[in-house]
C-alpha cells in the first residue's frame, strides 16, 4: 500500500465504523430490557449476549490495538449488572444462554463510551500505523483458529487486520444476529 492508499483506507474505516456503531445505537433505541433479555429457548442466545459480547470485545480488542486500558471494570459491572461478567468468547452456548443485562441504560452508557473512544482514536490515527504488526507469526493458539488468522499476511496480524476483523467485521456479524433475534421478540430488522 502507498501513503495515499493508507489514507483512503483509514477514511473508509472511520466512515464504516461510525455507520456500524449507528446501527447499534438504533438497535438500542428501539429495544428495551424485555427484548434483549428475552429467553427464546435452550441453545438460542439472548440479544443481551450479542450486545455485551460485541461491545466488551471491542473494548478488549481496542486495548490490544491501541495500548489503552480496557474500560470495563468492577465499577461498570456494578452499574450495568451483567448476569455473567464475561464476554463469553471462551464459554459455551449452554453457559451464555443465561446472559442478561441488569441496567439497560447503564449498558447504553458503556457502549457509547467504548464506541466513542474507538471513533476518536480512528480520527487521530496515522495511516502508516495500519501496517504495524500486532500479532506476529507463528500465531499463538488463542488466535490460530480465528477468522483473523485466516486473514493475516505472512508477517502476522496487522493493525488493519485487527480493525477489520476484530472490530468491524465482528460487529457486523453480531448485528446480523441481533437483527435476526429482533424478529423473535416481535421487532423488525435494522437495514434492508
Image (tube, rainbow, N blue to C red):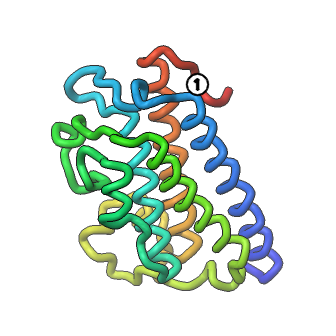
Q: Is residue 29 left or right of residue 87?
A: right
Q: Looking at the picture, how far across and down is residue 176, in whole percent?
A: 51, 35
Q: In which quarter of the image is residue 104?
A: top left
Q: Residue at x 35, y 41 (%)?
A: 101
Q: Looking at the picture, how far across and down is residue 188, in whole percent?
A: 57, 20
Name the one closer to the observer, 103 or 12: 103
Q: Is residue 186 left or right of residue 80?
A: right
Name the one closer to the observer, 4 or 51: 51
Q: Residue at x 69, y 48 (%)?
A: 19
Residue extending farthest to the right is 4
Of the 4 image quadrants, the one containing the C terminus is top right
Q: What element carries label 1?
A: loop
Residue extending farthest to the top is 186
Q: Residue at x 55, y 37 (%)?
A: 28
Please tell me how many numbered marks the rendered image carries: 1
Q: Looking at the picture, how far across and down is residue 50, in whole percent?
A: 40, 42
Q: In which quarter of the image is residue 56?
A: bottom left
Which residue bears the numbered disc 1?
189
Name the one closer to the observer, 156 or 92: 92
Badge 1 crowding class, 10 Å Cα cut-off, few under 14, some 14 to 19, many 20 or more, is: some
Q: In this view, does 146 lie to the left or right of 12?
A: left
- Residue 153 higher or lower than 176, as above or below: below
Q: Looking at the picture, how far across and down is residue 79, in whole percent?
A: 37, 53
- Residue 162 higher or lower than 90, as above or below: below
Amino acid at each position: 500500500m502507498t501513503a495515499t492508499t493508507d489514507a483512503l483506507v483509514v477514511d473508509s474505516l472511520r466512515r464504516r465504523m461510525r455507520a456500524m456503531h449507528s446501527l447499534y445505537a438504533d438497535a438500542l433505541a428501539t429495544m428495551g430490557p424485555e427484548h434483549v433479555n428475552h429467553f427464546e429457548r435452550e441453545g438460542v442466545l439472548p440479544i443481551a449476549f450479542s450486545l455485551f459480547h460485541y461491545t466488551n470485545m471491542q473494548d478488549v480488542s481496542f486495548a490490544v490495538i491501541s495500548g489503552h486500558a480496557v474500560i470495563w471494570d468492577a465499577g461498570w459491572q456494578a452499574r450495568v449488572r451483567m448476569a455473567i461478567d464475561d464476554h463469553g468468547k471462551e464459554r459455551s452456548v449452554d453457559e451464555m444462554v443465561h446472559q442478561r443485562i441488569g441496567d439497560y441504560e447503564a449498558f447504553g452508557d458503556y457502549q457509547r463510551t467504548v464506541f466513542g473512544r474507538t471513533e476518536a482514536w480512528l480520527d487521530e490515527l496515522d495511516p502508516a500505523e495500519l501496517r504495524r504488526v500486532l500479532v506476529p507469526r507463528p500465531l499463538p493458539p488463542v488466535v490460530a483458529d480465528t477468522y483473523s488468522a485466516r486473514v493475516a499476511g505472512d508477517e502476522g496480524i496487522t493493525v488493519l487486520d485487527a480493525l477489520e476483523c476484530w472490530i468491524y467485521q465482528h460487529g457486523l456479524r453480531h448485528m446480523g444476529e441481533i437483527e435476526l433475534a429482533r424478529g423473535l421478540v416481535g421487532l423488525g430488522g435494522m437495514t434492508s
